[in-house]
Amino acid sequence: MLAFDRGVSMIAGIYPPMNPFLLKTLHLLGVFALFASLGASLLASARGRLASVLHGVSLVLILLVGFAMLRKPPMDQSWWMVKIALWLFIGLAPMLAKRGLLPGAVVFALTLAAAAASSWLGLAKPF
Ligand code: HEM
């Protein structure tokens, strides 16, 4: 292990160092939660119209860029298929809350978990 890595791990109070995929996933979870909070405080007006549009546009962007990165889906692997299922869940999530099937805060927590899981799958490509 590099001396620098060891130093950073010791400063962060995590020695021995954690799995880099787990660290990156937690880092991204922080980013998702941060931007969700910005969205909630900045886009909440006009009955969430802007938020709904951004939800749709960003979902399409994620899917298109995802397939662009895959170029040809590796059919012998399944991590990317799980990512599509998670993507679908995140896409349908607002409906679950709107129809009163689950409380909004619960759906929100589940979408954050789905985003973190999707990030880990993209980083680790475990299966
Ligand atoms: C909200 C949903 C999603 C999130 C949060 C997400 C997040 C991520 C992250 C963080 C990475 C790692 C990037 C890196 O290597 O540094 C990644 C990689 C990847 N994602 Fe996603 N992703 C999502 C949905 C999707 C979908 C739906 C697809 C497929 C259509 C997809 C395809 C890919 C591919 C192919 C990679 C690997 C790129 C490579 O290293 O070759 N992702 N994703």
Image: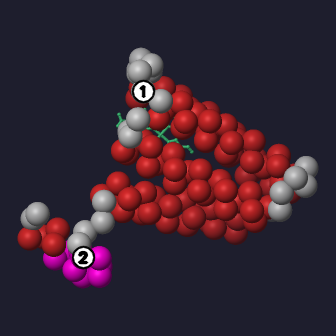
* Any part of residue 66 in sight: no
Q: Are marks 2 and 1 in contact (CB under 8 Å)?
A: no
Residue closer to the observer: 118 or 53: 118
The kind of residue on which mark 2 rests is Tyr
Q: Position of residue 4 (x, y in %)?
A: 12, 70
Disc 2 on helix, strand or loop? loop
Q: Which numbered marker is on residue 77? A: 1
Q: Earlier in the sequence, mark 2 or mark 1?
A: 2
Q: Position of residue 42 (x, y in %)?
A: 69, 65
User: Circle 2: is it few (<14), some (14-19), or many (20+) Cα within 10 Å?
Assistant: few
Disc 1 on helix, strand or loop? loop
* Any part of residue 19 in sight: yes
User: Circle 1: is it few (<14), some (14-19), or many (20+) Cα within 10 Å?
Assistant: few
Label 1 CB sits under 8 Å from any ligand 1 atom: no
Is 75 one of the magenta-colored residues?
no
Q: Which numbered marker is on residue 15? A: 2
Residue 70, compared with residue 38, is above or below; it is above
Q: Quadrant of the N terminus?
A: bottom left
**Left or right side of 29 for 126:** left
Please tell me which residue is depicted at 48% across the width and 26% down the height of the picture. Answer: 67
Label 2 CB sits under 8 Å from any ligand 1 atom: no
Q: CA distance from mark 2 to mark 1?
A: 33 Å
Residue 37, compared with residue 61, is above or below; it is below
The kind of residue on which mark 1 rests is Gln
Q: Position of residue 32 (x, y in %)?
A: 54, 59
Give the magenta range: 7-15
**Left or right side of 8 for 40:** right
